[in-house]
């Protein structure tokens, strides 16, 4: 005997879905999107598509520190490439944090030996003047 809902009996369509029409049939995506738009409007929310919530969720996952593999799995992407391409450059805060982390790797003072940093072109001048303050290096011939 086929599974059935108490109200619909054997006419119940068992899709295995949680959100369905009254008879168990799948909801049409356009209908769900339209209903979402109506509810968002009635709640005085800014205009946003239902699909945009998916992008928002992915962005928040990245902002919370989730790795690409986790985000791709939660969004049910077959590979991590889409998640990498679309979501990793969205938040300015993430770009700022990455820039700050990179800047933290750059040495902030002259070496203890007082030598000049390694350069590929001839330079004149020194890394420090007599007062010990950093002065700009001038490339030879400029």
Image: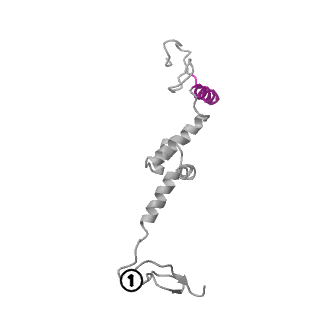
Q: Residues within 10 Å of mark 1 (few under 14, many from 20)?
A: few
Given residues 108 and 135, the one toward you in this image is 135
Horizontal and vertical percent position of residue 94: 49, 53
On screen, residue 140 above or below 88: below
Q: Which of 92 and 19 is in front in this view?
A: 92
Name the residue tied to disc 1. Answer: 114
**Residue 30, above or below 100:** above
Identify the image quadrant of the C terminus: bottom right
- Residue 75 seen: no
Q: As drawn, is 36 to the left or to the right of 113? A: right
Q: Magenta stretch containing residue 38, yes or no?
A: yes
Question: Where's residue 106, x and y in %?
Answer: 43, 69
Vertical position of residue 1 compared to residue 45: above or below: above
Q: Is residue 47 or residue 130 the one in the foreground?
A: 130
* Left or right: 12 in relation to 112: right
The x, y position of residue 136, in whole percent, is 50, 78
Give whichever of 5, 98 is nearer the camera.
Answer: 98
Part of the protein shown in magenta? 25-42
Residue 83 in percent (x, y) is at: 54, 49
SS of the residue under disc 1: loop
Q: Is the magenta stretch mostly helix, strand or loop?
A: helix
**From what the image shows, is residue 53 above or below residue 109?**
above
Display coloring: one colour
Q: Residue at x 48, y 50 (%)?
A: 68
Q: Residue at x 38, y 83 (%)?
A: 114
| Residue 9 visible in the picture | yes
């Amino acid at each position: 005997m086929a599974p059935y809902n108490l109200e619909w009996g054997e006419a119940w369509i068992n899709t295995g879905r949680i959100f369905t029409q009254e008879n168990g049939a799948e909801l049409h995506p356009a209908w769900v999107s339209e209903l979402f738009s109506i509810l968002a409007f009635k709640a005085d929310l800014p205009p946003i598509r239902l699909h945009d919530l998916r992008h928002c969720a992915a962005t928040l996952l990245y902002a919370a520190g989730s790795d690409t593999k986790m985000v791709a799995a939660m969004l049910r992407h077959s590979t991590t490439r889409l998640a990498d391409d679309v979501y990793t450059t969205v938040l300015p805060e993430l770009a700022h944090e990455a820039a700050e982390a990179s800047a933290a790797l750059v040495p902030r003072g002259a070496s203890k030996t007082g030598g000049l940093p390694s350069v590929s072109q001839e330079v004149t001048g020194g890394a420090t003047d007599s007062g010990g303050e950093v002065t700009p290096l001038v490339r030879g011939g400029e």
